[in-house]
Amino acid sequence: MIHILGIRHHGPGSARNVKEFLEKVKPDIVLVEGPPEADPLLQWVNHEALKPPVAILVYQPDDPQRSSFYPFAEFSPEWQAIAYARRNNIHVRFMDLPISHQVALEKEKKEPPVAVEPSVNNYIIRNNEAGDKIAFAKDPISYLAEAAGYEDGEKWWEHMFEHRQSNEQVFEAVTEAMQVLRETMPGKEDRAEQCREAWMRKTIRQAEKEMFRNIAVICGAWHAPALVNMPSAKEDNELLKGLPKVKVECTWIPWTYSRLSYYSGYGAGIGSPGWYDHVWHYPHDDGTRWMAKVAQLFRTKQMDTSVAHVIEAVRLAESLASMRNLYKAGLEELNEATRTVLCNGESIQMQLINDELIVSNRIGEVPQEIPKPPLQLDIEKLQKRLRLPAAADFKDYTLDLRKENDLERSIFLHRLQLLEINWGERQEVTGKGTFKEQWRLQWSPELSINIIEKGNWGNTVAEAAEKFVMAKAGDADSLSVVTELLENTIPAELHRAVETCIQRINNLAAASGDVIQLMEVVPGLVQATRYGSVRKTDADLVMGIVNSMLTRIYVSLPAACTAVSDDAAQKLLEFFFKLNDAVNVLQQSDITSQWQQTLQAIATGGNTTPTIAGYATRLLADYKLLEGEALVRVFHYAMSSATPPDKAAAWLEGFLKGSGTILLIDNDLWNLVNNWVDTLDEETFTRVLPLLRRTFAGFSSPERKKLGEKVKTGGSGTTVKQVESNIDEERAKRGLPVIMQLLGIKTKP
């Protein structure tokens, strides 16, 4: 006898019905919708260390991004069916079209691989090529809900099936309803779906050939009619003939309730996995346990919630259920009661309840003994040793790199980032020093694919990261790309990879005649040397290449500053600023001295672009190499009548780049600028005004305000405002003796 049990994926009501039905009919084989390649993994179900939610990951070894997930929660009907079979030593198999064929079919269609297992919720959405099928592209269950007077198919299914217990007619009713829907569906199913159902029927026939007499079939409700009314084996075999095939592998991975939610994009997802988990474990709860969970959550967030609140909320939920002719309160009624009683009518706290309880952040566990790629095993070993558990919720870690364990954590996280396994995200850290790092960690199931993909580079994190970086550096043809790679590699302490990056930078720098490109990468290299003392890294290799690049910059930069367009000059000033900062960070007298000599050559060069010459002069003034009368002479020459106004305005822009404080404190320079502006005729002033405006726009608001006040006072920059006193001195003197006495000061009589 064949029992077709059409279920809703991840429905606790369906799961309970399946479990009770199987216990009653006692089948000798259980067939479950799922990938046959994963049959060897079924032996792990009921293992004490395999804790849902978990998922079967099926992937192509040569292209891991082409993968499919088959998630299971404890309240998934498929999980309960498999668990029942394993518990009672009954044969259990998956019966869907092998993923090796499904992926190949997707390749033939030149579409991205299906990331989730097709279900009643997303069956038609993937293939609505014909215009008359678009109207049917939404959830088919919604049609049944509309016929019953419900606007939401999710709520209808929950009220009709999820709260029912031991209803043996449910499966027949679901199959009959889906049969009607399939008959009214416009157009035809695509080849992939036809092949899937043909393979399911083929698996059922194979079980019959093997002399199994009591067969239980667990499948998505949509497929149930296709398995009840089976065509001939010849038709199915013809349909399955010549299917393309690729090699795939399978493993168990942890899953999360948040990824089980349809809000994450999972086609067979549900809106409230945390709530369904509660319904599964406490089917007879009238709302009291749920409200107790809500109250406990609020208390952990320092939100006052009394027992009276819980009692009143439960009573209100029961009243709402009675008014709506429901035999018990569902999630909607409990949410409305919670909002009214516990949240004072506000919805802000409801988001907290949704995230923590209704959806939940629960993550599953997978036994260490399950066959896994070596790289994943090494990552899990390091996570355990360094006490960095994988969690679905994000968690912040502040690392003190002077501590051995924190330093190892940092190295591990940096290596994962280099492998593009983005479990951790580096956060900005306030304060000075390089001994402190802030990381935010959040695990997601998709990282398992990245781990498998990068497993080709090595069996350990260190080996894989090192080889991956070395290959990436060898393929790069841009100095900036390799420099950024080096910056990220040094804190990961991959010495061979560091040497490879440095060698690649040397080669690219030697072949590059672009001094601007060298200026662009030097600040990053200088930043990389700062890790030397903290991470016990020898920075001499990096400093060697920095010195070489700086020497080339000092020689080539003056010539590169001539005949430069305005836009290019503005860009070049940014590189000047960063390079100047890098020189100051190094704090090496010989490097600083050579940089100052280069600035002197640029500032005094007759053909230097005025904007750059002005900025070089300003840097010399900041180094105190130009000050007092010497600075005034240079300034006077640049702003004299012998210099064309356009060039003078450009020079002034460069000199005042980013800050006008010097004009506030040096009246001689202020007067030179003021007098120069006075000498301009109306036409010339109008021509240079946009440039002057851009110059002063770069100042901070307080600077502009003080400069404006200085203009008003004729250049002195100070105003003395006589404040009239409204104090009655005679009355004030009368209180002095009392004040002196309070202060303990003796006065002469």
Image (cartoon, rainbow, N blue to C red):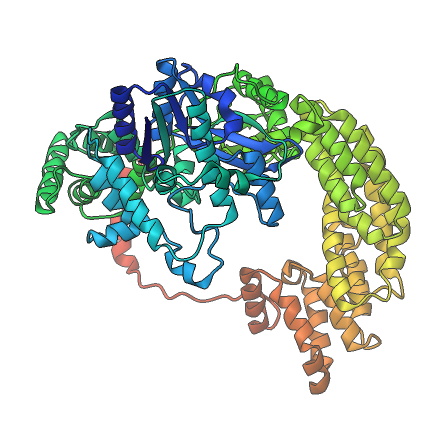
Residue 656 in the image: above or below residue 27: below
- Residue 355: image location, x then y, percent: 34, 38
Image point (67%, 64%), residue name: 667
- Residue 90: image location, x then y, percent: 38, 16
Count of numbered circles on the image: 0
Give the quarter of the figure containing the C terminus: top left
Residue 586 in view (yes/no): no
Q: Nearer the viewer, residue 125 or 447?
A: 125
Image point (66%, 21%), residue name: 460
Residue 149 in the image: above or below residue 417: below
User: From the viewer's perspective, is 51 left or right of 563?
Assistant: left
User: From the viewer's perspective, is 528 left or right of 1?
Assistant: right
Quadrant of the image occupied by residue 166: top left
Image point (75%, 69%), residue name: 650
Residue 461 in the image: above or below residue 259: above
Quadrant of the image occupied by residue 532: top right
User: From the viewer's perspective, is 749 left or right of 253?
Assistant: left
- Residue 91: image location, x then y, percent: 41, 18
Q: Nearer the viewer, residue 483 or 588?
A: 483
Q: Nearer the viewer, residue 230 or 596?
A: 230
Residue 339 in view (yes/no): yes
Quadrant of the image occupied by residue 616: bottom right
User: From the viewer's perspective, is 420 left or right of 605?
Assistant: left
- Residue 569: image location, x then y, percent: 77, 63
Give the quarter of the figure containing the N terminus: top left
Image point (40%, 27%), residue name: 31
